[in-house]
Every structure is written in structure tokens, then in C-alpha cells.
């Protein structure tokens, strides 16, 4: 990676400089991260090992869990380690890599959520055409396009980051590398780059949120023509999706659609969507989904039974 500056590393200030609070940060986010990885891996294994979950909805849920695990891993481990470290230095190249990973898996999560909304729309509003529209081949193409779109978005972000010259302070008032805190350290006029950031990340977050909420409003409106049982089942599924959308996009829009200013609450808002939402997703999708819970029970019953026989 080409460096346009004299800075070779940065110092992440993290969430707090207080030693007692740093220990609390370590404990809390260690639990969150382990819960995120275990919960999402459990969903991944359950979907892959159960034939009853071989439907488009669970196909997309598999990739949402995968994106959640990677998205959280791009930030949480360093936050956890730095909470107990005397030095919190991150090299320039590692910082740029974190920017790339953060946007790659964050954007992937956005695109998968859109695919899940599309799946529910077709299933509820076009039930007779559902097998044709949401065939296996179509789902694979949609996921491939999501990966390609996420990669292009991340490349755009890393190009912006690499164009920033750093020649003075290297203290990042954040727990991870992202363009907003890096813009504060750049020794140049960052107005244009911030405009490009808003037109890229901000536009993706805002437009995706509008698309998702519009699709769910249309879905909920169409439920009037369904039976009480079908309506309750669809409401349960859509409610889970809407909760995820609001929890994820609310903080994203707050962070990426603002002028080049930083607020004291930015770090906590970023924590919510980079670590909090990936932790909550498995709980939302399992606690509110009887089919996934039953599949998990069967999976663990088989594992325990086979282990007992040995």
C-alpha cells in the first residue's frame, strides 16, 4: 500500500483511557464477541446440516450470519486486546486493511438484508411465482452480486483512505480505523473526500434503508388478504427483519450521512452497529423463529446421542 505521508503507524485511543473502565470494556466486549461468533456459527452449522432449512430465506440467513461474524471480527478483537494493552499501536497497512474489511462485510450485510426483504416480498406477495423467481440459481446470482458490490464499495473506500496524507498527529480518537476519524488527522482539506464518503457510504445506507422499509410496508399492507395463521407467521418473520434493519441502519445513517464533524457519542454509536447488532442478530433470528430453534434442538440431540454411543 502506497503511503502519501510520513506516518507509519497510528495509536487507537479506544473507548476509554481509564484503567478500571478498560477492564470493563475487555469483559463486556469479550462476552459480546464470543457470543457473536458462537451464535452465528451455530446458525451457519444448523442451516448447512438441516435439509428442512434449504430454502431461500435460510440461504440468505446463512450469509447474513457469515457477514456478521466477519464484520464483528474486523473490529472487536483489536478493541478487546487493546483494552488490556499498554500500547495500542496499529500500523498504517493494518489500519488500511481494517478500513477495507469493515466496509466489505458491513456492505455485504446491507446487501444480504435487501435480498432477505426481496425473498419475503416474493413469498408473501407473489406466492404462486415464488419457486420460479427465487430459485436456487437466482439466489446464488444475487449473493455473487452482493459480494461483487461489497468489494467495489470497499475498493472505493480504501482508495479514498489511501489518498489522505498524514504528516502530524497520529492519535485516532476511536477504537478502530475508519474514514471519519482518519479525516480529522489528514493534513489537507478533506471537504471533497467527505463529500465522496457521504455520496458513497451515506447513499448506500440511506437508500438501502428506504428500500427495505418500503418493501416491508408493502408486505405488511398485503397481509390483509391472508388468513390469520399466514398473517401471524409472516408478521413474526417480518418483525424480526424490521428490528434488524432499524438496529443496523439507524447508527449507520447517523455516522455516514453527516458533515465532516465528530461527536462524543460517535464511538458508542459505532460500537452498536459493528459489535452490538452482529451479537443481537442470532438472538433475534433464533428466539423468534421456531423452525430454526427446532433444527438446532435436533442437531444438538444428534450430536449428544452420537457422543454418548461412542
Image: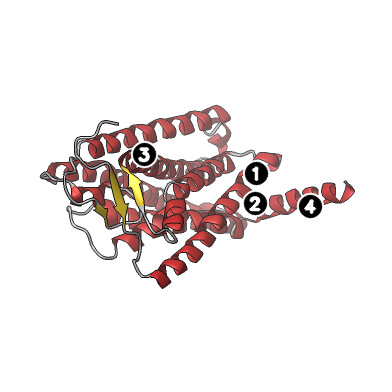
Query: Could you classify mark 4 by the number of other residues whose Cα lies within 10 Å: few (under 14), some (14-19), or many (20 or more)?
Result: few
Please identify the quarter of the rendering in which residue 12 is found: bottom left
> Residue 256, position in %: x, y?
27, 51
Along the viewing direction, whichever of 23 and 214 lies nearer the viewer:
23
Residue marked by disc 4: 301
The answer to whether mark 2 and mark 4 are in CB contact below 8 A is: no
**Spatial distance from mark 2 to mark 4, Cα to Cα?**
14 Å
- Residue positioned 40% across, 48% down in the render: 215
**Spatial distance from mark 1 to mark 4, Cα to Cα?**
14 Å
The secondary element bearing badge 2 is classed as helix
Any part of residue 246 in sight: no
Dot placed on the residue nearer the N-terminal end, 4 or 3: 3
> Residue 280, position in %: x, y?
51, 58
Mark linked to residue 45:
1
**Spatial distance from mark 2 to mark 1, Cα to Cα?**
11 Å
The secondary element bearing badge 1 is classed as helix
> Residue 162, position in %: x, y?
24, 36
- Residue positioned 83% across, 46% down in the render: 306
Relative placement, left or right, of 44 versus 261 is right
Residue marked by disc 3: 97
The secondary element bearing badge 4 is classed as helix
Amino acid at each position: 500500500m502506497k503511503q502519501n505521508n510520513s506516518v507509519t503507524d497510528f495509536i487507537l485511543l479506544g473507548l476509554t483511557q481509564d484503567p478500571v473502565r478498560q477492564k470493563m470494556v475487555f469483559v463486556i466486549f469479550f462476552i459480546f464477541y464470543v457470543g457473536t461468533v458462537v451464535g452465528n456459527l451455530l446458525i451457519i452449522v444448523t442451516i448447512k446440516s438441516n435439509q428442512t432449512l434449504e430454502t431461500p430465506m435460510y440461504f440468505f440467513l446463512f450469509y447474513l450470519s457469515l457477514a456478521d461474524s466477519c464484520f464483528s471480527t474486523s473490529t472487536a478483537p483489536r478493541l478487546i486486546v487493546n483494552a488490556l494493552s499498554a500500547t495500542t499501536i496499529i500500523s498504517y497497512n493494518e489500519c488500511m486493511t481494517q478500513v477495507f474489511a469493515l466496509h466489505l462485510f458491513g456492505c455485504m450485510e446491507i446487501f444480504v438484508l435487501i435480498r432477505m426483504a426481496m425473498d419475503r416480498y416474493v413469498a408473501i406477495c407473489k406466492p404462486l411465482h415464488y419457486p420460479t423467481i427465487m430459485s436456487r440459481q437466482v439466489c446464488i446470482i444475487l449473493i455473487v452480486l452482493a459480494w461483487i458490490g461489497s468489494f467495489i464499495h470497499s475498493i472505493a473506500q480504501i482508495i479514498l483512505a489511501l489518498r489522505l496524507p498524514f504528516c502530524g498527529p497520529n492519535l485516532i480518537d476511536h477504537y478502530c480505523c475508519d474514514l471519519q476519524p482518519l479525516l480529522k488527522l489528514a493534513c489537507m482539506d478533506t471537504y471533497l473526500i467527505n463529500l465522496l464518503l457521504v455520496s458513497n457510504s451515506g447513499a448506500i445506507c440511506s437508500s438501502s434503508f428506504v428500500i427495505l422499509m418500503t418493501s416491508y410496508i408493502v408486505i405488511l399492507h398485503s397481509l390483509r388478504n391472508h388468513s390469520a395463521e399466514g398473517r401471524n407467521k409472516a408478521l413474526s418473520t417480518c418483525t424480526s427483519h424490521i428490528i434488524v434493519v432499524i438496529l443496523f441502519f439507524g447508527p449507520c445513517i447517523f455516522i455516514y450521512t453527516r458533515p465532516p464533524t465528530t461527536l462524543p457519542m460517535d464511538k458508542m454509536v459505532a460500537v452498536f452497529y459493528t459489535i452490538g447488532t452482529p451479537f443481537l442478530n442470532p438472538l433475534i433470528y433464533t428466539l423468534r423463529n421456531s423452525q430454526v430453534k427446532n433444527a438446532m434442538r435436533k442437531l444438538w440431540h444428534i450430536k449428544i446421542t452420537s457422543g454418548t454411543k461412542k
